[in-house]
Amino acid sequence: MNLLFSNDARGSYPDSWYAATATPLPPFAPLQGETRADVCIIGAGYTGLSAALHLAEMGADVVLLDAHRVGFGASGRNGGQLGSGQRQDQITLEKLVGSDAARALWDLGEDSKTLVRDLVARHGLDCYLRDGVAWAASRPADADDLHQYAEHLQTRYGYDRIEALDRDAFHALCPSPDYIGGTLDMGAGHLHPLRLALGLADAAAKAGARIHERSHVHDIRHGSKITVRTDAGHVIADQVILAGNGYLGGLDRQVIARVMPINNYIVATEPLGEDRMKVLTRDVAVADSRFVVNYFRLSHDGRLLFGGGETYGYRFPADIPALVRKRMAVIYPHLRDVRIDYAWGGTLAITIRRMPYLARVRPNMLSASGYSGHGVGTAIQAGKLLAEATRGTSDGFETYNAIPHTPFPGGGMFRTPLLTLAMTWFAMRDRLGI
């Protein structure tokens, strides 16, 4: 079974609020016959689109292949949060890689936000980019941790866009009975992810990248030149970039041993009207401190977009609204019976370290994946770094490449059942509040 085709109609976007509020690009023709390229990119999400755009702007001849449509995967389905720093907090990174490397990773995280904002401005991408992400705590210990972390960023990294909020201040922003405090990061942001992906695809095509949709890659033949085969054609390339993330399948054993696909779910409620002020009083996004994170924001048409809940098999649950509604009702009991107009799932990818895995898996093949829920800025930046690495050296690529990544126990064969056991335990801790 292949995650590319387990839950979605071939060549179609999911029935999401994002798809309903975006204008798709005219279809790009499938690959037919033989073609040659300097670089062949597999996967037209943020990573692949960014790599294609930057390579084309460097003058490279680049072919970009996707089994479905551009932005079909996590890039067009995610929570739309443009976070600061990395998926792991800086205190954890300081212990893992040392203070100098942790500083370099913080700077890369900040650069990723700047890159997204610059691309949006330079290409006129209408993706509703707004400032502000709040982190919410349900337990006193979590609130203390968030406040201490904000102070750490302010004093150690000179980051002055984040502030600690006590119970009253947080309730003034996010009137949920579940939360008792948190932080507000006005240097982070939120946006419409599919509109961003479509805009990047349009920009890459205009820059000269050759994009082929409905071109499922099923085989890679290695050598001094690499042959990438689809059902109806093949690309002979000097270099290949793997940008499939959770949808990569079995195209490379080194990657699948370290990167694990998981599924996450989002709903969009009916427009809330004046009741939206009982959800959020400002146009910011929210993520909470649970291990299985809840994340949400208001849409530009007044709906609550609420994400949460994970599964680890190939199939999405039959009743996604019920799965997400249960978590939403904990945060907002007054929305227990609100109408849900859209519900969708998607596949992302995680690593054991919860840090992206960027690697040169063969002398002429690079890969980036495993963004672990922090992919909006990081994946777009990774595409740029991969583009640089194919043309020579990239300090940013080497900084990510130096992160020690442990393979999942048992590699690709046993990672799913073992992860399911571990995540079930953490989910139970969330429910019990321990």
Image (spheres, grey):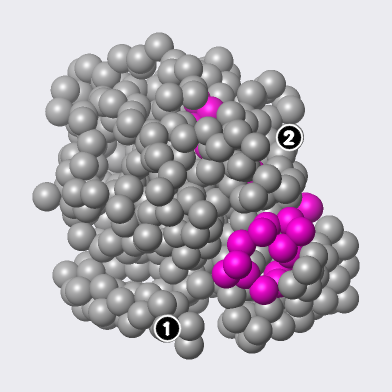
Q: Is residue 221 left or right of residue 281?
A: left
Horizontal relation, residue 91 to residue 380: left or right: right
Q: Which residue is mark 2?
A: 118
Is 312 placed left or right of 308 in the picture? Answer: left
The residue at the point 26 percent across, 63 percent down is 312
On the image, the x and y values in percent for residue 10 come to 21, 29
Q: Which residue is mark 1?
A: 432
Mark 2 secondary-structure assignment: helix
Q: Please check the rendered image and state whether residue 27 is part of the magenta-colored stretch, yes or no.
A: no
Amino acid at circle 1: Leu
Q: Give the mark, 1 or 2, whose residue is nearer the N terminus.
A: 2
- Where is residue 180 drawn, in percent x and y? 67, 74
How far apart marks 1 and 2 lie (CA) works out to: 43 Å
The answer to whether 54 is drawn above or below residue 377 in the figure is: above
Residue 84: x %, y % from top left: 69, 58
Q: Nearer the viewer, residue 38 or 214?
A: 214
Residue at the farthest top position: 26
Judge depth for marks 1 and 2 and give the one in front.
1
The structure residue drawn at horizontal position 55% and vertical position 15%, both measured from the top left corner, is 206
Q: Is residue 161 above or below residue 391?
A: below
Q: Is residue 185 magenta?
A: yes
Q: Is residue 263 above or below residue 42?
A: below
Q: Residue furthest left?
A: 1
Q: Which residues are magenta?
A: 170-198
Amino acid on which disc 2 is placed = Asp
Q: Position of residue 150 (x, y in %)?
A: 78, 72
Q: Is residue 85 visible?
A: no
Q: How many marks?
A: 2
Front one among 428 and 261:
428
